Amino acid sequence: MIVGGIDESGKGPVLGPMCISIVILDKEGEKELERAGVKDCKLLSPKKRTQLAQIIKEIAIEEKCLLIPADEIDKKREEGINMNKIVVNAMGELIKKTKKKANLYIADAADVNPERFRKRLAPYLPPNAKLLCEHKADTKYIPVAAASIIAKVERDNQIKKLSEKYGEIGSGYATDPKTIKFLKKILKKEGKYPPFVRKTWKTAQRIKKETKQTKLEKFNKN
């Protein structure tokens, strides 16, 4: 039995790319990764994730990671493609790109309705392959947990590169005060958002609106 685990990192943040990974394993590979401590990336420290990512790459039959930049996400959303479809299309692209085809693919469902997600992803499968889509699949299946680690490590690397160039940007999530502070600062300084900000996100639009309102109020006072 050859299994392909698929997961994403960065579907929700207002900053940075979304990273989607596929990891293809045989049964022995699954056992090795389980012994190595592979589990849902959210349960691991950044250091442990990085260490395990290297082990996964050495043991997996094949692994790939696809990056979807923020400006590409904005473009697709403006074309009427929602995030669930963006995730499905990216996962499908990864399935098609892998040279080694699996008997079973397991994906972490990026939809409130896992069955709807499964039906949308199913057309991308090779002949005779089966597909399982579940919420929190990264907590239940080693191949998906492995994919979650690869995707998370890659996204963290991308955020680190952006931080090195732009200064402190936080995690990229709207709940992070550092990210909100950066959005306000860059908008005030540049007058526009850089390409790695998801401009179609409500958070980015709200801050832009508030910034314009503040400038208008200052202008009126003068």
Image (cartoon, rainbow, N blue to C red):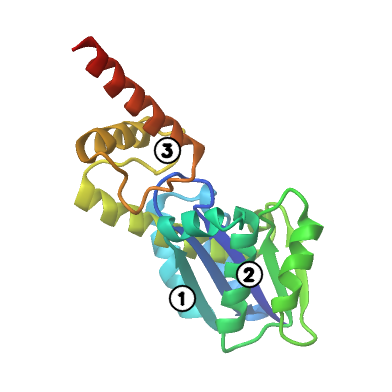
Q: Position of residue 7 (x, y in %)?
A: 59, 62
Q: Which residue is mark 3?
A: 204
Q: Residue furthest top?
A: 221
The amino acid at mark 2 is Gly
Q: Which mark is residue 57?
A: 1
Q: Residue at x 30, y 42 (%)?
A: 169
Q: Position of residue 178 (x, y in %)?
A: 33, 33
Q: Is residue 38 visible?
A: no
Q: Residue at x 60, y 88 (%)?
A: 100
Which element type, helix, strand or loop, lies under badge 2?
A: strand
The amino acid at mark 3 is Ala
Q: Which quarter of the picture shows residue 168?
A: top left
Q: Which of the marked residues, 1 or 2, is nearer the chain's N terminus?
A: 2
Of 98 and 38, which appears nearest the observer?
A: 98
Question: Where 163 sits versus 69, above or below?
Answer: above
Q: Distance from label 3 to label 1 (Cα)?
A: 36 Å
Crowding around mark 3 (Cα neighbors within 10 Å: few <14, some 14 to 19, many 20+) is many
Q: Which of the marked residues, 3 or 1, is nearer the chain's N terminus?
A: 1
Q: Distance from label 2 to label 3 (Cα)?
A: 32 Å
Crowding around mark 1 (Cα neighbors within 10 Å: few <14, some 14 to 19, many 20+) is some
Asked if marks 3 and 1 touch (Cβ < 8 Å), the reply is no
Q: Which quarter of the picture shows residue 120?
A: bottom right
The amino acid at mark 1 is Lys
Q: Which mark is residue 5?
A: 2
Crowding around mark 2 (Cα neighbors within 10 Å: few <14, some 14 to 19, many 20+) is many
Q: Residue at x 59, y 61 (%)?
A: 86
Quadrant assignment for the C terminus: top left
Of 208 and 14, which appears nearest the observer?
A: 208
Q: Which quarter of the picture shows residue 173?
A: top left
Which element type, helix, strand or loop, lies under badge 3?
A: helix
Q: Position of residue 68 (x, y in %)?
A: 46, 63
